[in-house]
Image (cartoon, coloured by chain):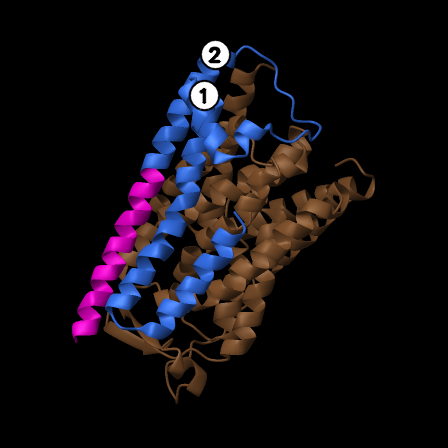
Chain colours: A blue, B brown
Amino acid sequence: MAINIRDTDLKRTIGQLLRYGVLSSSAIVLTGGIVYLVRHGGQYPQYHSFLGEPDKMRRPALMWKAMLRGEGRALIQIGLLVLIATPIARIIFSIFGYLLEKDYLYTVITAIVLLVIVWNF
Amino acid sequence: MTVLVFTAIIFVGAVVAGLLGSLTGLGGGVVIIPLLTLVFKVDIHYAIGASLVSVIATSSGAAAAYVKEGITNIRLGMFLELATTVGAIIGAWMATWLSTSIIAILFGAILILSAILSFVRLADPAVTGKPGSLSQRLRLNSSFPTAEGEQPYFVKHVIGGFFMMNIAGIISGLLGIGSGALKVIAMDNVMRVPFKVSTTTSNFMIGVTAAASVGIYLKRGYIDPSLSMPVVLGVLAGAFAGSKILTTARTTRLKTLFAFVILVLAAEMIYNGFVHNI
């Protein structure tokens, strides 16, 4: 029975983690979007051919610097990073949850999933 | 068209895509990618990048609600994520060297498959009999709340389901969609999990699957912030609205209509792929 109670706790916390992750990232993306539209709303977009994003939109450290300079696009990108981090945080959290439950099989399974994701970032 | 007008139109399109995707269970990506590439002539790499990010948003948003209700089989989801994340990385890697025309044709083919799969009669869930030894060792058998109380169920054919999930992961990473239809079919018809459990567990896994491949897209410069912004916010708003009206809408008629729309989009994608217009 003790395991069941912890399982429910784990589920509730995972639910809250996902909700706040999505809410905060949407707020950041929206703020960045407003900054971007106020500054560049009158320009003409180009998406027909694929050029690839510049380095400052690809690497988190450079995104952060660009954001501090007040670039709306960099702030949107930071918001997207928060969004991407939400399911990853859910996995990290679950690893600790299974460890507390002494469910070592699922601690290992979840840790492998985390490694697969982080290894490719 | 200025950035402001372009962003506003994309946002409205994304709301509709999110709404339809959530009502039919196929996800917003299957509408937003054809919309961006066929109507707005956006390069398919940017379209897939934006869709992939929106997939994470809708999956996390919906999973937050379902997980609390206790229907999602979290262990089953975690276990199958082994298959989907590895698949997603293979898919994202393929997307970087396949030509855009081939990606468009594959996208059309998967659209047709998804439309057909949404009409497949689902197998009866395994609620009686004996559980298999593998599902028991992995502690996958569980129960879910119904109006008549907790309903226990067994998970069958674990290896077959795992293999199908790997394919679903590859498609997700390659085409930037959640491939929820394929995941639900794998859990329903192969693993014989009850429908409510398979849909919520599939949703739970979609975000992690997309997170595995999105790193590759970001590094390659496929995630454009100004395009992703209206797509993510729009799809999320549409999906949220969809989840609110899901209980009252007549889903069978809607499904037929949506399947027809998808077939038209699929034909357009395949045609444009063949004439190298994408």
| Position of residue B172 in the picture relative to residue B11 (left or right) | right
Which amino acid is tagged 2? Arg
Chain at tag 2? A
Where residue B155 appears, x then y in whole percent?
A: 42, 77
Residue drawn 60% across and 27% down?
Answer: A54
Q: Which residue is identified by label 2?
A: A39
User: How many other residues sit within 10 Å of disc 2, few (<14), some (14-19) or many (≥20)?
Assistant: few
C-beta proximity under 8 Å, tags 2 and 1: yes
| Position of residue A89 in the picture relative to residue B150 (left or right) | right
Where residue A5 appears, x then y in whole percent?
A: 18, 68
Please state which of residues A85 and B57 is positioned toward the viewer in this rendering. A85
Q: Which residue is identified by label 1?
A: A72
Residue A5 counted in the magenta span: yes
Please state which of residues B33 and B114 is positioned toward the viewer in this rendering. B33
Which span is picked out in magenta? Answer: A1-23
Residue drawn 67% across and 44% down?
Answer: B264
